[in-house]
Amino acid sequence: MIVQVGPYPEPIGGVSIYIKRMKLYMDSLNIANEVWDLSNRNKNVKKVTNVRFRYVPFKYLFRKNIKLIHYNIPGISYKIYIGLFNKLFFKKRKKILTIHGDSKDLFVHKSLFGHKWMFVRNQFIMKKSLNSFDTIICTKSGDKKYLLTKGINKPIYELPAFIFPFENENSIIPKYILDFIKGKSFIISANASLIQFYNNQDLYGIDMCVELIEKLNKDRENVGMVFCIPCINNTQYFNMIKKTIIDKKLKSNFLFVNEKMELYPIIKRSQLFIRPTNTDGDAVSIREALYFKIPTVASDACVRPKGTLLFKTRDIDDLYNKTAYVIKNYEVAKEKLEEINSKDNAGKLLEIYRECFKL
């Protein structure tokens, strides 16, 4: 039995989709597996169990049939908590951790009042916690080298969190979205898991998307933006953005999709996908777009997959210029993507599981 620990849709997000698709992949191979869902809502899906995070180690302790447990858990405190149990009770049982995001974020946290000795102690604790796992997977390129400098002495793999979609999944698009798409000469899609800020700026660049559509429609006809955001966690900012859309007379050209649904069916029906984030990890949505051969423009906030056209982070003029270039040279942009071969990382992840069994 293999167990994945983390969120399972809903919520819809990069990590939850990663877990769902890996489960479907193992199901297709008749590999015994379960998901321990941390999202505090029963999903009524076979072999998906809602478990409160603090009880996960105790559930693992009494389930002797589990050959491997794969943690997809956020933040610092969660990893330290599981690391403590790993050291005390699970030294001989197989444990994998995937770090979704930047591994550096785990070592830069400062303690109260910023005392240097506390900072050093926190780094020591994180090193011990990560070394309590048998294997570590990083989704961001370059993180393996960084973790080695921090004294992590367990096998480390770099593996993007993109797993091919199972297109027999429920991918019905609501009629209002299809009607919007049909009524436009060119469709751009983008997404955010929720409203979030980084360095006091809109992390996912929702504000930039609005400005982009305004600029594009000044010299082109009927360019539409479908922006998927399943969770509206900041109504004040969201309402401000919607007011801006109305004030700029863009209501017929900008559609927010607040649906609990997969992103890929909308990406497939787009001509262009954009990712205007001001910080990022290995964005699954970009790999999804490239997999479906949809031209993609993204900020240079981090290393992006081959085939992505980059613009300067938070530079609306550069975003506009790169987007306008793709629209003007669309067939050329599409042809370039034919050279890109996307890799399904589910098989590679299964190989890592098997390597872990040998340790």
Image (cartoon, grey):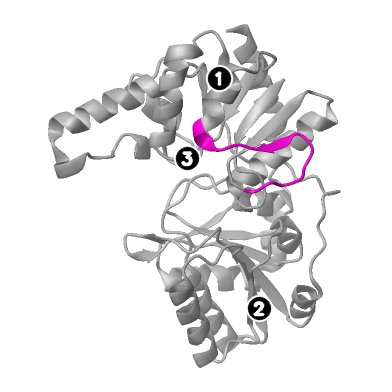
Looking at the picture, how far across and down is residue 213, in whole percent? 56, 79
Q: Is residue 163 visible?
A: no
In the image, is residue 22 part of the stretch drawn in magenta?
no
Look at label 3 and name its amino acid.
Answer: Pro
Q: Which residue is mark 1?
A: 95
Looking at the picture, how far across and down is residue 119, in whole percent? 20, 33
Q: Which residue is mark 3?
A: 74
Q: CA distance from mark 3 to mark 1?
A: 16 Å
Majority SS type along the magenta span: loop
Look at label 1 and name its amino acid.
Answer: Lys
Looking at the picture, how far across and down is residue 84, in whole percent? 40, 21
Q: Which stretch appears magenta?
A: 41-54
* 163 over 131 or under it: above or below: below
Image disc number at residue 52? none
Q: Nearer the viewer, mark 2 or mark 1?
A: 1
Q: Nearer the viewer, mark 3 or mark 2?
A: 3
